[in-house]
């Protein structure tokens, strides 16, 4: 894959939809605190968020009635204003198909991984994409399995 204008020389971080949901969900305060930290820090350290993550967040929070539609939209707007949004391109689709077929990943997880990897991410925080899984230069980390020090290092 060639270098594109969206790639950066520094390692960026991103997070999955479940992390964004935990950042607003107060039912598990430990996960909520960790997720809030990740979301906040991604805005401070040049992190990225996939358009897919924002779309899934809106759908999940409104469908499950975790948030009223207007508040869910406000959170999407605030998040996209604070964190660079990256959308999938055709090459991401082809990479996702490859990951789905060769690594048996869920297709939409593979699409998110391909998109944020192209955007220069070395770390993707997710509770359910396989802690420690490494494909290409992207490593998935479950932040709820990390010590406070390990989380700090991953967000540095």
Image (spheres, rainbow, N blue to C red):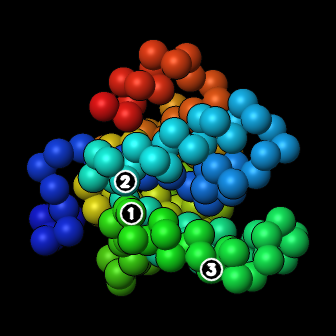
Residue ID at (45%, 20%):
150
Q: According to the image, label 3 marks what residue?
A: 73
Among numbered discs 3 and 1, the one appearing first in the sequence: 3
| Image quadrant where residue 28 sits | top right
Question: Which residue is depicted at the point 52% across and 19% down?
Answer: 148
* Element marked by disc 1: helix
* Residue 133, x across and y down, in percent: 51, 38
**The residue tagged with tag 3: helix, strand or loop?**
helix
Label 2: which residue? 43
Task: Look at 69% across and 75% down and name the residue there.
Answer: 71
Work out whether mark 2 precedes mark 3 in sequence or the reverse, and give the earlier one: 2
- Residue 39 image position (x, y, % from top left): 49, 49
Q: Residues within 10 Å of mark 3 (few under 14, many from 20)?
A: some
Q: Which residue is mark 1?
A: 82
Whether residue 116 sits left or right of residue 144 in the image: it is left
What whole-number distance in Å separates the C-alpha atoms at marks 2 and 3? 18 Å
Q: Quadrant of the C terminus?
A: top left
The answer to whether residue 142 is left or right of residue 83 is right
Q: Quadrant of the N terminus?
A: bottom left
Looking at the image, do the residues carrying marks 1 and 2 touch, with CB atoms under 8 Å apart?
yes
Q: Residues within 10 Å of mark 1 (few under 14, many from 20)?
A: some
Marks 3,1: beta carbons within 8 A = no
In this picture, residue 26 sits left or right of residue 154: right
Q: Quadrant of residue 3?
A: bottom left
Alpha-carbon neighbours of circle 2 within 10 Å: few (<14), some, or many (≥20)?
some
């Amino acid at each position: 894959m060639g270098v594109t204008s969206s790639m950066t020389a520094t390692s960026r971080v991103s997070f999955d939809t479940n992390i964004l949901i935990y950042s607003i969900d107060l039912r598990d305060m430990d996960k909520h605190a960790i997720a809030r930290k990740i979301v906040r820090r991604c805005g401070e350290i040049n992190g990225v968020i996939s358009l897919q993550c924002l779309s899934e967040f809106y759908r999940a929070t409104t469908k499950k009635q975790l948030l009223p539609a207007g508040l869910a939209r406000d959170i999407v707007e605030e998040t996209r204003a604070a964190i660079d949004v990256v959308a999938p391109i055709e090459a991401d689709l082809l990479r996702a198909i490859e990951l789905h077929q060769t690594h048996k990943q869920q297709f939409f997880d593979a699409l998110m991984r391909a998109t944020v990897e192209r955007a220069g991410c070395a770390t993707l925080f997710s509770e359910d994409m396989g802690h420690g899984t490494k494909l290409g230069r992207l490593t998935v980390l479950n932040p709820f399995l990390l010590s406070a020090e390990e989380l700090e290092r991953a967000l540095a």
